[in-house]
Image (cartoon, rainbow, N blue to C red):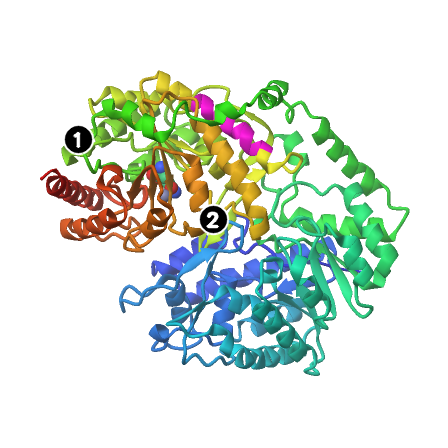
Amino acid sequence: MKTHVLGFPRMGVQRELKFALESYWKGNSTLDELSKISRELRLNHWSVQKKAGLSCVSTGDFSWYDHVLDTAVLLGVIPKRFRDLPSGGAELYFAMARGDQKKNIPAMEMTKWFDTNYHYIVPEIEADCSPRLSSSKIFEETREAVEAGFDVKPVLLGPISFLALAKDVDGFDRWSILPQLLAVYKEILTILSANCQWVQLDEPVLCSDMSEKERNHFTTAYQFLNSSNINIKILLTTYFDELDDNLDVALDSGCAGLHLDLVRGGKNLDEILNRFPENMILSAGIVEGRNIWRNDYAASLDILNKIQAKLGRDRMMLASSCSLLHCPETLECETKLDSEIKSWLAFASEKCQEIMELKTLVTEEAACDALQNNQFVIESRRQSRRVHNESVQKRCTEITDEMKHRKDSYALRKDAQRWLNLPLFPTTTIGSYPQTDEIRRHRNDFIKGSITEEAYNSFIENEIDKVVRKQEEIGLDVLVHGEPERNDMVKYFGDQLAGFCVTQNGWVQSYGSRCVKPPVIYGDVSRPHPMTIRWIQYAQSLTKKPLKGMLTGPVTILCWSFVRDDLDRSEVCQQIALAMRDEVCDLEKAGIHIIQIDEAALSEGCPIKAKNRPDYFRWAVGAFRLTTSGVENSTQIHSHMCYSEFNRMIHAIADMDADVISIESSRSKMELLEAFADFEYPNEIGPGVYDIHSPRIPSKEEIIDLLHKAVAWIPAERLWVNPDCGLKTRSWDEVVPSLENMVAAARTLRCEHQK
Ligand code: GLN
Ligand code: ZN
């Protein structure tokens, strides 16, 4: 029975890769130095897998930016605008990922990897694209591992997922390059076959809704690869959901092995086992690759024993459910974590050990210690007083439908909100203002204990003074406090809510060198004390203009945390919603009558398969409404979502019933408002009028242009004027003139409409 993981985290425990990359990009270190650190990291990661006892280590899973980009480079799928750059080198690779400022070549697009918070680079398939083997990275890394004495299993993104995740350029049908692509895959597998028995071809699209056409392409592709007489076994890996409609093509693929995600999939395991082809090996993805909880061995053994009884141990492999890319590397450095909570966790390294222990348990009846120890931990978590809070559970049972509805409909609320006295085209911002080095320094000093709480608090008050004054000078209509006390919109609340804890090194790659450290939700969630009132109330005391209070919504807090697996996500979300509802009501009591609840992750939490979406939107929108519906009609609720793909969720957005939503729309030049117009979206909208990701200062004229476009879709009385998102990554000398132009543009539109 072979054991393996589908991939290992790349960054290093102390985010060594992040710092090496950023130093190289800044020109502070050489490519040799970056390569050296990368090699050390790979060796390290392979050693962890080998030390745990896994049958082989994964190669090719390491990446300087993203594995989809690596695949595009490997296959020679390079968009035209990059073709003048020297082929195969780091310059080309990083230009594709990040753009080339000097040569003025824009980067490739980036988007979310299925329903994770990892982002991949979207391959662009142009009409003249001619795939050919164009990189030796995977061969070199595989050889490197072999030479260091490891048994290897190279990992590659499969051709069907590669094309499914790519985009057509200028209407060219990307599927038409499949035959050429397959020829390159054949070449790759042939070269790899010198060093390994198995190759892992990832086809996660098999766990999404595929069209009949895509399924046919899949069948063609795998028939071709499996009849190519290459001396290599293909392990076809699927993950993130059930196979459902794609089960047949997976079983009939002719691959030597099929990997199933038994954590998120496997509901119909019995049926799968009954139909499992005789010459196929099943790789059982039993240890969760996307979360951080210890595996429940008793539950896993039930499943594994069933597979063993049906297929026999020679036709089984044991594995992580998906790549471990989505969890942190090791618990070893978590010295500050509460020891009881720590005993409930397993990061990537510990998961490798779990796979081995499970193997021992299925294959050797005598090995009972591991099971007993494991069950002791599982039971301690089940019973722990830290996890269960009766008053929270009781409160959840008392939630009524009424609590999820504002007192009256938007039409009546609009009247009740007239007292806010806002002009036509009111101007506002999304919440954060520049997070200067000074702010960061003070925050770090406070965490380290080198300045007192008093000193820190008065520093923050000073910052708020500054931000409020600046906004008054700029002439904005609805002000914010600027969020200087927050470094992260989820962690700030995670730090203060009960049921949450934070790790020291629990970093997970989000994109490129960017990592996030999601808080851990281990127990029932409650709010021991108000979290934001002090700062927001202080800000309001400084101005006569209305001040908008800022909170993060329950769905976003859920999506950007590691969530307990012993309670349904919808229920965890509801608990967070109750806690945030208390905060909303306290803000209102404190005299804040405009409150924004950010739901940046609402779209990301959306299930991969269409059939699961209605249920998600029901509870996710329900949680938002539970958060916001405790206030009077006269209080105005805002929400903010920073993306522009609203078509599949416009119903849900309308259902949230926020009085005002702000969205990202400058890049689509307001085009996305069409969806809102078609839907006859009834409430107010602030379409972003400039891109905050760029240092460029938008002119008054271009903002006026965009607003003219917006007015064509949405009636003027329902339009707000704001940037695409928060301003924390920008500098003050970009922010002030940009907002001045924005305010001037809004005034121009006001004049045009009051005539
Ligand atoms: N209020 C947050 C900010 O302005 C919103 C951030 C976000 O949507 N990602 O930074
Ligand atoms: Zn945003």
Looking at the rendered structure, the number of numbered marks drawn on it comes to 2
Q: Is residue 212 magenta?
A: no
Residue 578 lies in the magenta stretch: yes
Rendered-image quarter of ligand 2: top left
Q: What element carries label 1?
A: helix
Q: Is residue 175 visible?
A: yes
Q: Which of marks 1 and 2 is nearer the N terminus?
A: 1
The answer to whether one can see residue 496 in this image is no
Q: Position of residue 444 (x, y in %)?
A: 39, 34
Residue corresponding to mark 1: 472
Among the 4 quarters of the image, the one containing residue 443: top left
Name the residue rendered at 51%, 61% in the picture.
38
In this view, the residue farthest toward the right is: 366
Label of residue 515 in the image: 2
Q: Residue 540 carries which label?
A: none
Locate the N terminus and report the quarter of the image it occupies.
bottom right
Q: Name the residue rendered at 50%, 29% in the picture.
A: 577
The one nearer the camera, 726 or 733, is 726
Q: In which quarter of the image is residue 382?
A: top right
| Residue 402 drawn at (x, y percent) | 50, 23
Q: Are marks 1 and 2 in contact (CB under 8 Å)?
A: no
Disc 1/disc 2 C-alpha distance (Å): 35 Å
Please report the bounds of the magenta region as a residue range: 571-583
Residue occupying image coordinates x 22% and y 43%:
735
At label 2, which amino acid type do we have?
Cys
Q: In this view, does 358 lie to the left or right of 336?
A: right
Q: Position of residue 72 (x, y in %)?
A: 48, 70
Whether residue 126 is situated above or below residue 371 in the rendered picture? below
Disc 1: residue Cβ within 8 A of ligand 1's nearest atom: no
Q: Which residue is drawn at 22% across and 53% down?
A: 696
